Image (tube, helix red, strand yellow):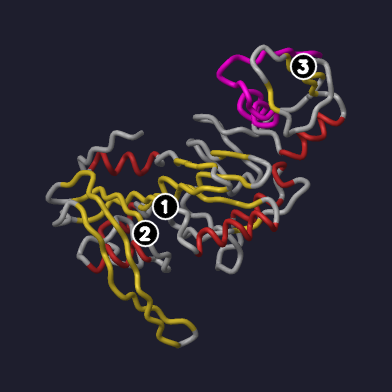
C-alpha cells in the first residue's frame, strides 16, 4: 500500500524525520531511519537521509509501513507498561533523535533508587522509543509531581543537558495550588534549607522567583521559577511561608484530605533551554485532577 503527501509551505525547510513525526506519528528515530534506508519512505522518489530537509511541493511516498504509532492524543493511552503508564492527557510532548520530552504522571518515580519498583527510566527502556538506544535521566522530578520531564537518548546529550541544568541554563516553570492567601503577589524566596543525609546536617541556599496567578482567602495558584534546584525546594518554601501545597503529605499535609487521597498539587508546567543557538520550549498539559481543584477552590487559570 502506497501513501503520498505533498509538502506545504508551512513545512518548508523541515527535516524529513521531524515531518514524519509531526504528520504520521511519533515513530522512534531508529525506525524512521530504517524505513528511509529500506526505501519504505522516499522523498521525490529517492532514498534520503533523516537529516534531509523537505521543500514546498516536495513529494513524500510511504510504502507498506504497517506501523501503528504509539502516540498520545487527547483521551488515548500510551502503554509500554500497562500497569504503570496510563494517561488521559498527552504523554509524549516531543520525540527527536537526541531526547524525549514527556508529561510525567504523578505517582511514578523518574528513576531507580526509590522504594517504588516502577520508574519512568525502566519503563521507557522497554518501549519502542528506546528500541535501539538507552534512556538517560538528566534531572529530577518528585514522584508526586507531574509535568515536563526530559529523557536523553545518548550519553553525549545526557552530559550536555546535565551540564545545562547544573549551570542553571535550563529554566523551569512550576504551578502550585496552596493553602491560604499568599500575601505578596510576586517576589522571591531566598533562604537556607536544611536536609539530612546519612545523619549529616546539610544547609543549602535556595532561591525561587514567584508570581501569584490568582488567590482568595482560602487558597492561591502560584507560578514558580526555581533558580536553584534543591530537593523539595518549592514544597519547603511554601510550607515555610505558611502556604503549604494541597496534597503535600510531607510538608504541611492536611489530615482532612487523607480520606480523599488528594494528589500533590504541584505541576512542572514549562521548560526552556537553548542548544547550538536553537531555542526549545516545552509545555505540559495540566492534569484533570489539578483542573478540578482549581474549580473547587475557585481559582482562575486561562492557559489550558
Residue position for label 1: 172
Tell me whether the residue at label 2 lies in contact with that at label 3, contact meaning CB atoms closer than 8 angstroms. no
The local crowd at label 3, few if under 14, some if 14 to 19, many if 20 or more residues have their Cα within 10 Å, is some
Q: State the residue at coordinates (56%, 63%).
A: 116
Tell me whether the residue at label 2 lies in contact with that at label 1, contact meaning CB atoms closer than 8 angstroms. yes
Residue position for label 3: 61
Lower position in the chain sequence, tag 2 or tag 1: 1
Task: Give the residue at the far bottom of this rendering.
Answer: 199
Q: State the residue at coordinates (63%, 60%).
A: 159
- The question of residue 123 being in magenta is answered with no
State left or right for residue 124 relative to residue 73. right
Vertical arrangement, residue 204 with respect to residue 200, above or below: above
Secondary structure, mark 3, is strand
User: Which mark identifies residue 226?
Assistant: 2
Secondary structure, mark 1, is strand
Q: State the residue at coordinates (27%, 50%).
A: 222
- The question of residue 2 being in magenta is answered with yes
Query: Between marks 2 and 1, how big is the CA–CA gap?
Result: 7 Å
User: Which mark identifies residue 285?
Assistant: none
Q: Give the range drawn in magenta.
A: 1-25
Q: State the residue at coordinates (29%, 44%).
A: 293
Quarter of the rendering containing residue 111:
bottom right
Q: Position of residue 64 (x, y in %)?
A: 82, 20
Amino acid at each position: 500500500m502506497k501513501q503520498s503527501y505533498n509538502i506545504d509551505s508551512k513545512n518548508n525547510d523541515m527535516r524529513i524525520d521531524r515531518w514524519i513525526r509531526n504528520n504520521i506519528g511519533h515513530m522512534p528515530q531508529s525506525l524512521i531511519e530504517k524505513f528511509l534506508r529500506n526505501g519504505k519512505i522516499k522523498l521525490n522518489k529517492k532514498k534520503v537521509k533523516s537529516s534531509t530537509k523537505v521543500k514546498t511541493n516536495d513529494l513524500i511516498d510511504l510504502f507498506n509501513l504497517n506501523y501503528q504509532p504509539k502516540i498520545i492524543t487527547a483521551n488515548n493511552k500510551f502503554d509500554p507498561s500497562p500497569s504503570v503508564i496510563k494517561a488521559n492527557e498527552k504523554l509524549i510532548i516531543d520525540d527527536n533523535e537526541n531526547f524525549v520530552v514527556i508529561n510525567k504522571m504523578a505517582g511514578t518515580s523518574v528513576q531507580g533508587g526509590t522504594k517504588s519498583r516502577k520508574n519512568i527510566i525502566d519503563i521507557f527502556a522497554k518501549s519502542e522509543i528506546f528500541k535501539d538506544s538507552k534512556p538517560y535521566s538528566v534531572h529530577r522530578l518528585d514522584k508526586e509531581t507531574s509535568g515536563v520531564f526530559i529523557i536523553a537518548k545518548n550519553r553525549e546529550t545526557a552530559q550536555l543537558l546535565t551540564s545545562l541544568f547544573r549551570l542553571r541554563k535550563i529554566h523551569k516553570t512550576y504551578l502550585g495550588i496552596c493553602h491560604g492567601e499568599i500575601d505578596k503577589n510576586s517576589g522571591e524566596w531566598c533562604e537556607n534549607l536544611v536536609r539530612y543525609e546519612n545523619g549529616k546536617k546539610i544547609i543549602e541556599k535556595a532561591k525561587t522567583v514567584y508570581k501569584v496567578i490568582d488567590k482568595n482567602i482560602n487558597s492561591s495558584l502560584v507560578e514558580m521559577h526555581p533558580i536553584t534546584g534543591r530537593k523539595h525546594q518549592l514544597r519547603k518554601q511554601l510550607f515555610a511561608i505558611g502556604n503549604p501545597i494541597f496534597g503535600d503529605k510531607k510538608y504541611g499535609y492536611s489530615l482532612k484530605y487523607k480520606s480523599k487521597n488528594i494528589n500533590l498539587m504541584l505541576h512542572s508546567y514549562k521548560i526552556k533551554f537553548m542548544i547550538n543557538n536553537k531555542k526549545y520550549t516545552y509545555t505540559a498539559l495540566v492534569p484533570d485532577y489539578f483542573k478540578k481543584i482549581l474549580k473547587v477552590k475557585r481559582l482562575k487559570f486561562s492557559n489550558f
